[in-house]
Image (cartoon, grey):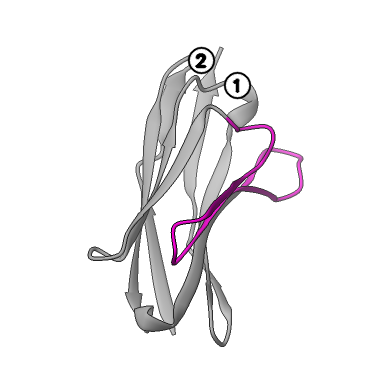
Amino acid sequence: QVQLVESGGGLVQAGGSLRLSCAASGNIFSITVMGWYRQGPGKQRELVALINSGGATNYADSVKGRVTISRDNAKNTVYLQMNSLKPEDTAVYYCHCITTRSNYRGQGTQVTVSS
C-alpha cells in the first residue's frame, strides 16, 4: 500500500501563489503516476495535473500556464506550484497516485482563494 500526505494549502488572495506538497510512503517503488485532483464546492472532482515516472506531465486546460507539477523521486514527493490563483481555484486538493496494482488518494488539503 501507499500512504499520501498533503500539505501547503491555505488562504490566499486572488493573484497569489501556493505550493502544495504530497509525500508518499509505503510501497513507493510501485508508483507510476502521481498527480493532483480537486473538488470545489458544489462541483465534481476534476483533474488538475499529472506527472509520470519519466517526468511527462498533463494539465487541465483551466490551469495551464498557471500551474506546474513536479516530482522529486529521491524524496518521494510531488509538488504543485500554483500561481495567479483565482477564486474559482478554491477547492480541496487531493494528491493521487497510480501503482502497478491500485490507486491511492490523500486526505486532501483546502485551498481558498479570496477575491
Q: Where is residue 102 in the image (x, y as percent from the top left)?
A: 58, 82
Q: Quadrant of the rendered structure where residue 30 is? A: bottom left
Q: Is residue 109 above or below residue 13?
A: below
Q: Is residue 52 left or right of residue 9?
A: right
Residue 46 inside the magenta-drawn segment: yes
**Which amino acid type is marked by label 2?**
Ala
Real-space Cα distance between discs 2 and 1? 6 Å
Q: Nearer the viewer, residue 25 or 32?
A: 32
Q: Do the residues labelled 2 and 1 touch (CB within 8 Å)?
A: yes
Q: Which residue sits at x=48%, y=60%?
A: 107
Total labels drawn: 2
List the residue tagged with mark 2: 14
List the residue tagged with mark 1: 87
Q: Is residue 85 left or right of residue 41?
A: left
Q: Which residue sits at x=36%, y=78%?
A: 28
Q: Quadrant of the rendered structure where residue 53 is? A: bottom left
- What residue span does the magenta drawing correspond to? 38-64
Q: Where is residue 77 in the image (x, y as percent from the top left)?
A: 32, 59
Q: Which residue sits at x=44%, y=57%?
A: 55
Q: Which residue lies furthest to the left in this view?
A: 74
Q: Position of residue 113 (x, y in %)?
A: 52, 23
Q: In this view, does 43 lie to the left or right of 108?
A: right
Name the secondary structure under disc 2: loop
Considering only order in the chain, which callout, 1 or 2, is on the residue closer to the N terminus?
2
Q: Which of 75 and 90 is in front in this view?
A: 75
Name the secondary structure under disc 1: helix
- Please identify the quadrant where the C terminus is shown: top right
Q: Which residue sits at x=58%, y=20%?
A: 86
**Label 1 crowd (10 A; few <14 / some 14-19 / many >=20):** some
**Which amino acid type is marked by label 1?**
Pro
Q: Is residue 85 above or below residue 80?
A: above
- Please identify the quadrant where the N terminus is shown: bottom left
